[in-house]
Amino acid sequence: MFSSILPSRSTALQTAHRLATREYVPMAGWLLSWFLLGLAIGHANVVRLIAVNAFVQAIRHLCTVETLTALSRRSHWERRPYRAARRIAFRIDLLSVAAATVVAAGLVSLLVYRGFGDLAAMVAIAALGILSRNPAGLLVARRDRSLSWRLGSTAAFVGASAVVLALGLHWTAAAATLAIRDWGGMIATWLFAPMRQPSSQPIDKPLTFAEIAERTEASARQRLSYRLMSALFGFALGPLGNFAARTGRGVGRLDRRIAAWVPRHRPGFMLFTLVTAGTAAFFLFVSREPSTVLGAGAFSRLAASGAAVLLWWNYGGRAKDEGEDDED
């Protein structure tokens, strides 16, 4: 009776292996890296660096587009048409990187104005990791990055953090570990990842900006759903919240299901984005304590995801996100 309900042993083992390699090992590496950096540069600077990671992720969510995912769907193409599609993706990525540079420069200027000179320098250094995916990630679009990117970035982050601690390096080197982490995922994929298997639904249409925009909007909705799910689990379960959120993402793709359930209501998204952006600004201006800076970073990431949905709203509602979210 129960055999038709319960998963088979092989399925359970596959699920456990997927969770361990794609969720729990990266989470353990993430925690270990922050612990090592805490020993190296102190608690206050680590809190600021966690906020910097959130600020940089917000810049990436707001400004970059899903060229890598769209190009990967054409990995089965012959050499010449594939290279033509990659050139289109590269040109679009250059525009997104230019936008990210402008936003990063504005954020750095704002932080300097508020007297956060060290924080501004951290953001400028860590933002170099954005280039690992846009446009450098296009170099590995034909490879299966579902595992290699996560494990490569985890190993790079742990290794770089250990070097900072062992050599007693400055907080600028600690900020560089965030960029090194992103580049570690790309390089590991380039060196070790197998080629992607042909899709069961191969695509033969030319790569267009509209398709990339559709996937960017879908990715933004999924990312926002995961952040809200993680926050809800954190509020309900405390330290176990991140573990529960990762389990939900890894087993049942709960973030994608929530994204599909959320109504496409533009005024609602506008209100959410304005409230979270306003809260981030409040935390940034009300105090210079590390804890308030951390709050500003967390709400800025939520606001950036909401703004990205609004930015690509007219292209949304048709594509399902197929990207691999390696965000922590």
Image: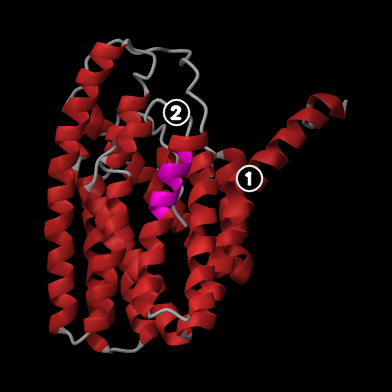
- Label placed on residue 21: 1
Viewer-nearest residue: 144 or 316: 144
Q: Which of the two discs, 1 and 2, labels the residue nearer the N terminus?
A: 1
**Place of residue 300 in the rendered image (x, y in percent of width and height, measured from the top left):** 29, 65
Image height check: is 101 above or below 151? below
Magenta stretch in the rendered image: 182-189
* Residue 67 makes an appearance in the image: yes
- How would you rate the neighbour count of disc 1 (Cα within 10 Å): few for under 14, some for 14-19, many for 20 or more? some
Name the residue tied to disc 2: 143
- Residue at position x 22%, y 15% from top? 206
Q: Nearer the viewer, mark 1 or mark 2?
A: 2
Residue 302, numbered circle: none
Indicate whether residue 186 is drawn in magenta: yes
Quadrant occupied by the N terminus: top right
Residue drawn at the location 48% of the way across and 42% of the way down: 188
Residue occupying the point 39% across, 34% down: 321
86 w.r.t. 55: above or below: above
Callout 2: few (<14), some (14-19), or many (20+) C-alpha neighbours within 10 Å? many
